[in-house]
Image (spheres, helix red, strand yellow):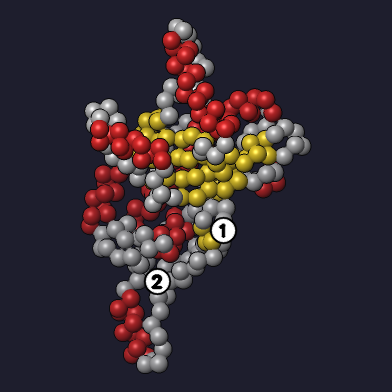
Amino acid sequence: MGWFWAETRPAVSTGAVAPAKCPVDHKALQAQKQNAQASGCPIDHSAYSKKTQATSSDTEAKCPVKHDDNLNPLNNMPVNLSSERIPGQKITLSTVRTISSIPRGESEDQGLWEYPSPQQMLNAMVRKGKAQDIPEDAVESMVDVHNFLNEGAWQQILEWEHKYTKETKIEPRLKMFTGRPDDMSPRAQMYLLLGKLFPNTFNTQPPFDRHDWTVLRSLGLNKGWKEVRYVIDYYSAPDEDDNMPAFMLDTRPALDNPTNAIDRFTHWSYPLYKKAMGEFDDL
């Protein structure tokens, strides 16, 4: 989830990958992670099984954490993501959810997307079997980074959508999103190959995460919306001078149609053309 923060819409970038700082000290989190006990679920199933067998030999031992597979297709999260403490949880996590700045759905009455609370984040990681090595006292910081990165990603998408927004005077909205950390994009594969061939020029490490976002682009007042899929790859970057970790992201419309292909070409070539012509003003 390597993203950057921007308070306002940035100028068109001369590159697809933008560096950024993260507000959380990841080295401290890594130290906590190394001291944590590895477990796919925070419940000691063997102990729970023995306890169950002691009370009833005919009862099958089950995990007391509900691993709900009923997912919301808009965000690939459980429809009813619990805010309850999990059995054996040692610290109290906040159940307060933060409202994002990202418009949700096709109309204003659908409001803005909400971020999961720290407790919901922990419950989601448990459900996916990804809670191993994550100490409970690191979850609050993870949520801060999660929210920080999503806000920055939306700013990058607004940059891509800027020319269409100027035409329609209607801001884009986010219909749905999904994480695809195990599906490396063709562009990421290409960069990884180039990194092996030219390690001094290209990145030699694969992205550590990938998201696909479905953005709604207005066709004009009362004319509906066009769905545009964006692909976002997340990379680690060298630490800043103050030893704070940094990230890079590669955000672009997916090559699903000729319009997206043209947008990608002009988005990256036009700044180079302006520079070649000696025009260095903000685009």
Crowd around label 1: few <14 · some 14–19 · many ≥20 (10 Å): few
Name the residue at the top extreme: 278
- Percent position of residue 42, x then y: 34, 67
Between residues 219 and 77, which one lies in front from this camera angle?
219
- Quadrant of res 161: top right
SS type, badge 2: loop
Q: Earlier in the sequence, mark 1 or mark 2?
A: 1
**Can you tell which mark lies on residue 53?**
none
Between residues 106 and 273, which one lies in front from this camera angle?
273
**Can you tell which mark lies on residue 72?**
1
Where 136 sits versus 220, above or below?
A: below
* Residue shown at 57% from the left, 36% from the top: 257
Q: Is residue 243 visible?
A: no
160 to the left or right of 241: right
Residue beneath disc 2: 87
Where 185 sits versus 272, above or below?
A: below
Number of marks drawn: 2
Q: Separation of disc 1 and disc 2 at Cα? A: 25 Å
Between residues 75 and 31, which one lies in front from this camera angle?
75
* Residue shown at 25% from the left, 63% from the top: 37
SS type, badge 1: strand
Q: Amino acid at mark 2?
A: Pro
